[in-house]
Image: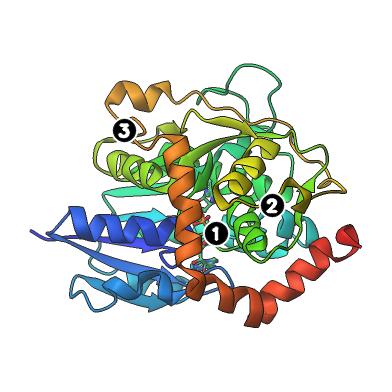
């Protein structure tokens, strides 16, 4: 029997990598991609599979029960990537985040419950734990989200758990660290800095540049999501980490090194308000089940930088002609860069 899965947010960064991986690695699966095509969702991210008979795209909002009902028809499982995802944008206005990252999850869970879905993977984030000075968060750690994005994701995360605890909707929750790789909208650290550096524009580095994140290649993340979709236990949470903790300044220097650009492009700017200092995840639970990251950080970062070098036709229209990107960049960095 054919397995048909609903992937939401499949036109975004991680979702598009996941859809491509599933179509390639599960030849008897069909994928329905439900995506609203916000500023971050791009049809071109999946242009290479658009004509695959096992792939169907539905443009729509996960907050709409009718749309979700239509898209979920005939599906046995769902993976919810759809979200507002940018911390900086959540600091400029949080309402969209509450809508999609909480209410949208509610709509999906209600429909999953109604149709008796066999598996529902909620993609959460390491941000829900908040900052940690030393050591690493396990799945049992207390949630302490400290920005509106993180708080809305924590709401979706716990709502999904509640639908398992209350109604036995077969929910699995993943909390991944910072992803990097191809097709990431060029407002996040790595693609922003690569594309700015390529044009000899300043790299606006927040604060002292010493905030620490763990970096996970998107392909390793997608493999982990596929793994828990097939093998995860209901009601469980799984941390997903690359094991590559780096300060932002280290990432910045590495990007400049690969591109052969000077450190003088770095501009230290006023910090993000409430900027969490360090995130760190213990991913031992998933590793003990058999998943482990395969992409070394040094190789993965270099390949990622080269991908943006070679795919200027993908990012240049976003940066030059997408009014949304320019409006955001001006609002976020205009005064900071002076
Ligand atoms: N990027 C990371 O480093 C990271 C780390 C951990 C977890 N996550 C989580 O992974 C998921 C995907 O992140 P990403 O970086 O690929 O995001 P993204 O911003 O690149 O893509 C989000 C996608 O969701 C779609 N979308 C937004 N609102 C929608 C709605 N209401 N209905 C339908 N579609 C909607 C957008 O059009 C877009 O295609 C998110 O849930 C995010 O919280 C991301």
**Looking at the image, can residue 113 be seen?**
no
* Circle 3 residues within 10 Å: few <14, some 14–19, many ≥20: some
Up the image or down, 44 lies above or below 85; here it is below
Question: Disc 1 beta carbon < 8 A from ligand 1?
Answer: yes
State the residue at coordinates (13%, 59%): 27
* Circle 1 residues within 10 Å: few <14, some 14–19, many ≥20: many
Residue bearing the label numbered 2: 87
- The mark closer to the camera, 1 or 3, is 1
Quadrant of the rendered image containing residue 97: bottom right
178 horizontally vs 25: left or right:
right
Image quarter (top left, top right, bottom left or bottom right) of the C terminus:
bottom right
Question: Disc 2 beta carbon < 8 A from ligand 1?
Answer: no
Residue bearing the label numbered 1: 83
Whichever of labels 1 and 3 marks the residue nearer the N terminus, that label is 1
Residue bearing the label numbered 3: 233
Residue 279 in percent (x, y) is at 63, 31
Whichever of labels 2 and 3 marks the residue nearer the N terminus, that label is 2
């Amino acid at each position: 029997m054919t397995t048909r899965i609903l992937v939401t947010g499949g036109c975004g960064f991680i979702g598009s990598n996941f859809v491509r991986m599933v179509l390639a690695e599960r030849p008897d699966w069909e994928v329905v991609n439900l995506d609203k095509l916000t500023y971050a969702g791009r049809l071109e991210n999946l242009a290479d599979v658009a004509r695959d008979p096992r792939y169907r795209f539905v443009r729509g909002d996960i907050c709409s029960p009718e749309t979700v009902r239509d898209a979920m028809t005939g599906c046995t499982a769902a993976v919810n990537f759809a979200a507002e995802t940018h911390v900086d944008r959540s600091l400029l206005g949080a309402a969209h985040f509450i809508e999609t990252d909480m209410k949208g999850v509610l709509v999906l869970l209600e429909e999953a419950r109604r149709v008796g879905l066999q598996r529902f993977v909620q993609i959460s984030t390491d941000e829900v734990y908040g900052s940690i000075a030393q050591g690493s968060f396990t799945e049992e750690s207390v949630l302490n989200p400290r920005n509106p994005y993180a708080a809305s994701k924590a709401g979706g995360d716990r709502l999904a758990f509640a639908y398992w605890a209350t109604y036995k909707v077969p929910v699995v929750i993943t909390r991944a660290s910072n992803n990097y790789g191809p097709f990431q909208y060029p407002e996040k650290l790595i693609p922003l800095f690569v594309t700015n550096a390529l044009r000899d524009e300043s790299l606006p580095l927040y604060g002292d540049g010493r905030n620490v994140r763990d970096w996970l290649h998107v392909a390793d993340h997608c493999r982990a999501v596929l793994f828990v979709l097939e093998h995860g236990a209901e009601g469980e949470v799984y941390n997903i980490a690359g094991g590559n903790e780096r300060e932002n300044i280290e990432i910045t220097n590495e990007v400049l090194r690969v591109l052969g650009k000077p450190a003088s492009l770095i501009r230290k700017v006023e910090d993000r308000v409430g900027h969490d200092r360090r995130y760190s995840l213990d991913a031992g639970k998933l590793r003990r089940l058999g998943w482990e990251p395969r992409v070394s950080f040094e190789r993965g970062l270099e390949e990622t930088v080269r991908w943006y070098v070679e795919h200027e036709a993908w990012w240049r229209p976003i940066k030059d002609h997408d009014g949304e990107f320019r409006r955001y960049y001006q609002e976020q960095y205009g005064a900071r860069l002076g």
